[in-house]
Amino acid sequence: MKTADARLQGLPPVLARHTRCVVLGSFPGEASLLAQQYYGHPRNHFWPLLAEIWQVELVAMPYRQRLAEVRRRGLGIWDAYASCRREGSLDTAIEAAELNDFAQLLRRAPGLQLVLHNGGESARAARALRSLGLPTQRLPSTSPANASWSFERKLAAWRAAFAAGGVA
């Protein structure tokens, strides 16, 4: 288990030149860092939500195949923070966070039209993204810690946002 004294490094962005919409999390949790996979906790709703929206068996796919499907559909995945100190996986435990270089989003995905924040901690980066001319929208977190939103309620919000971002 990591301690709050150890600086943690995030994961590289999942992008393609034709990416139209990016889901921006806060920072990978312990399970995701250990697996080196976005949304690696088995109870996180991210992959099941995408599977339901796209009607594709994403959860059963190997991780590399999931990422290929994400890219193919014009969706990107990244996090607000490049690094931080944190004990455990909760966003409330994030300390000394360093923002990712958001300008590279526009360089690597020049057709980017929308950034979807996966939860409140990610949405703290909205001002930096809007300063680059990128519209943002906050969505309910897919984290298992966000138990106040049912899967069906999250699905409705995420489905509408994916339609707005052209990745439904």
Image: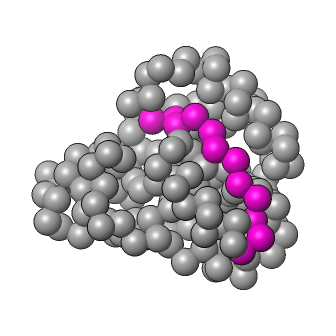
Residue 89 horizontal/vertical position (percent):
30, 45
Q: Is residue 148 magenta?
A: no
Can the viewer see residue 86?
yes
Can the viewer see residue 64?
no
Dominant secondary structure of the residues highlighted in magenta in the image: loop
Q: Is residue 18 left or right of residue 104?
A: right
Question: What colour scheme governs how the chains and residues are painted in the rendered image of this protein?
Answer: one colour
Residue drawn at the location 64% of the way across and 44% of the way down = 138
Identify whether 54 is placed above or below 18.
above
Q: Is residue 76 left or right of residue 59?
A: right
Quadrant of residue 57 within the rendered picture: top right
Check the picture and name the quadrant holding the C terminus: top right
Identify whether 127 is placed above or below 23.
below
Q: Is residue 140 magenta?
A: yes
- Give the magenta part as a residue range: 132-143
Residue drawn at the location 45% of the way across and 35% of the way down = 143
* Residue nearer the viewer, 161 or 45: 161
Residue drawn at the location 70% of the way across and 66% of the way down = 130
Quadrant of residue 19 within the rendered picture: bottom right
How many badges with numbers are in the image?
0
